[in-house]
Image (cartoon, grey):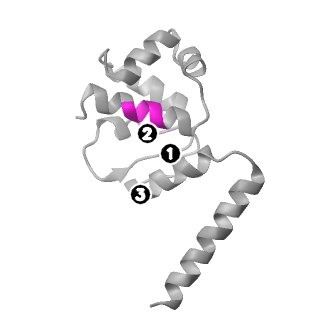
Amino acid sequence: MKSDKAMGELIRQLRKSAGMSQMKLAEKIGVSYQQVQKYEKGVNRLSVSRLEQISDALGVSANLFLGEGDALKAADSKGAYKGLSNDEGKLLMLYRRLQGKKIKTGFLEMLDDVVKLAERKR
């Protein structure tokens, strides 16, 4: 199992990637925003039931917090993302943090160009 601090950092990253404030997460799980701050800093230990509430609120699998493996078990509310590697999960989280359609489109076009360039060099 991850340390309290590591779980708190993961909660913070997932919350930010979802564009959610501490206040909004607190509201969704029925605690104060100060309590969310304590969870994110690793000051307060999380129960399994609270982890389940947080994972539901953030749209990820609770296994993400409990597992030690390399697979990022990110899932949206429909379960569309499962078994992503850590790098794939990070890429998705970063993409979700991008603001605006033009920036997202530009990023995807750039990534497409990088992939094409890499394929030509093979």
Callouts 1 and 3 close, C-beta under 8 Å: no
| Residue that carries the numbered disc 2 in the rendered image | 61
Q: Amino acid at mark 2?
A: Ser
Q: Earlier in the sequence, mark 2 or mark 3?
A: 2
Q: Quadrant of residue 88?
A: bottom left
Residue 97: percent from left, percent from top = 60, 44
Q: Which one is in front, 76 or 13?
A: 13
Q: Which one is in front, 122 or 49?
A: 122
Residue 77: percent from left, percent from top = 57, 40
Of helix, strand and loop, which one carries label 3? helix
Q: Amino acid at mark 3?
A: Asp
Residue 96: percent from left, percent from top = 60, 47
Q: Earlier in the sequence, mark 2 or mark 1?
A: 2
Q: Is residue 40 visible?
A: yes
Residue at 51% x, 8% y: name it: 32
Image: 118 above or below 61? below
Q: Quadrant of residue 24?
A: top right
Q: Could you give the CA–CA distance between mark 2 and mark 3, rounded to whole angstroms?
A: 17 Å
> Which disc number belongs to residue 87?
3
Q: Could you give the CA–CA distance between mark 1 and mark 3, rounded to whole angstroms?
A: 15 Å
Camera-side mark, 2 or 3: 3
Q: Magenta stretch?
A: 9-13
Camera-side mark, 1 or 3: 3
Callouts 2 and 1 close, C-beta under 8 Å: yes
On whether residue 10 falls in the magenta region, the answer is yes
Image quadrant occupied by the C terminus: bottom left
